[in-house]
């Protein structure tokens, strides 16, 4: 076994150890030493692989991303965007199913911890960037950040329903996801309409700012030092 494969194996062992402990213990009761012992990895090596429990959760999320992305196909390429996102998010929930007890307990423990929730939101944003890419949804441009945060909120709210949905058909979960996506789709359309409507005002605002900047004493002094002038005749 190469050093790289050995390191990867130990990382996987640590991730699985944390999720196993999280299914049985409160999040704040899980110590780094507990995870290292459960993974059978010395603390000295553990430190080189992960600096914190949050970093392990980040690796767990990337592993789930990989499973979803590996299962991405072109079958839904001709479907509406909402259907493509629905499919990707449901496949993500399928990949999370073996860890449902751990996630249920973690969500309960962390719901009143704002710092942890902020960190988890960033992990979710990173994942949703790739989930939307798998669904053929662009996250660049002026509305890219809104799409990412919206997808993270949609998935987070659906996840809460999924954690309590023990029906094998996941009817409640799918209904919740469908409603959330339809609402998100409407909000994005409104945001795009608002962006188009306010475009002339934004352009006017930029022009005013540029004009004020160019006429400020500091700007005039800088232009004078550079041999520039506002006199149109100077260009002749």
Image (cartoon, rainbow, N blue to C red):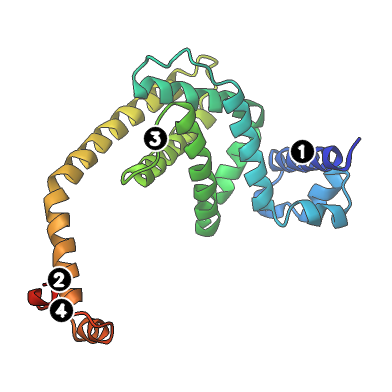
**What whole-number distance in Å separates the C-alpha atoms at marks 2 and 4?**
6 Å
Judge the density around disc 3: few (<14), some (14-19), many (≥20) Cα neighbours within 10 Å: some
For the residues labelled 2 and 3, say whether their Cβ atoms are less than 8 Å apart. no
**What whole-number distance in Å separates the C-alpha atoms at marks 1 and 3?**
31 Å
Q: Which of marks 2 and 3 is nearer the N terminus?
A: 3
Label 4 residue SS = helix
**Given the current orientation, which residue lies at the most extreme right position?**
1
For the residues labelled 2 and 4, say whether their Cβ atoms are less than 8 Å apart. yes
Residue under numbered circle 3: 138
Q: Which of marks 1 and 2 is nearer the N terminus?
A: 1
Question: Residue at horizontal 38%, vertical 42%?
Answer: 140
Question: Residue at horizontal 53%, vertical 59%?
Answer: 115
Residue under numbered circle 2: 211
The quadrant in which residue 16 appears is: top right
Does residue 48 appear left or right of residue 85 in this picture? right
Q: Which of marks 4 and 1 is nearer the N terminus?
A: 1
Does residue 182 appear left or right of residue 49 in this picture? left
Give the percent coordinates (x, y) of residue 234. Answer: 12, 77
* Mark number, residue 70: none
* Mark number, residue 215: 4
Q: In which quarter of the image is the N terminus?
A: top right
For the residues labelled 1 and 3, say whether their Cβ atoms are less than 8 Å apart. no
Q: Which of marks 1 and 3 is nearer the N terminus?
A: 1
Residue under numbered circle 1: 12
Q: Nearer the viewer, mark 1 or mark 3?
A: 3
Q: Is residue 46 visible?
A: yes
**What whole-number distance in Å separates the C-alpha atoms at marks 4 and 1?**
60 Å
């Amino acid at each position: 076994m190469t050093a790289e494969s050995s390191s990867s194996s130990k990382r996987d062992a640590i991730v699985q150890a944390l999720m196993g402990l999280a299914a049985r213990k409160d999040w704040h009761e899980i110590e780094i030493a507990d995870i290292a012992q459960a993974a059978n990895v010395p603390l000295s090596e553990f430190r080189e692989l992960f600096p914190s429990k949050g970093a392990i959760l980040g690796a767990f999320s990337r592993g789930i991303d990989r499973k979803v992305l590996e299962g991405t196909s072109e079958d839904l390429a001709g479907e509406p965007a909402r259907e493509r996102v629905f499919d990707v998010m449901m496949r993500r929930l399928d990949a999370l199913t073996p860890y449902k007890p751990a996630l249920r307990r973690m969500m309960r423990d962390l719901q009143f911890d704002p710092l942890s929730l902020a960190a988890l939101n960033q992990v979710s944003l990173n994942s949703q960037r790739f989930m939307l890419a798998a669904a053929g949804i662009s996250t660049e441009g002026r509305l890219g950040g809104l799409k990412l945060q919206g997808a993270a909120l949609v998935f987070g709210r659906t996840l809460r329903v999924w954690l309590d949905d023990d029906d094998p058909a996941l009817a409640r979960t799918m209904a919740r996801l469908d409603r959330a996506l339809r609402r998100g789709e409407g909000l994005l359309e409104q945001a795009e309409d608002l962006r188009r409507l306010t475009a002339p005002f934004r352009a006017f605002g930029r022009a005013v700012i540029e004009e004020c900047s160019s006429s400020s004493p500091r700007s005039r002094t800088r232009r004078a030092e550079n041999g520039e002038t506002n006199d149109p005749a100077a260009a002749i």
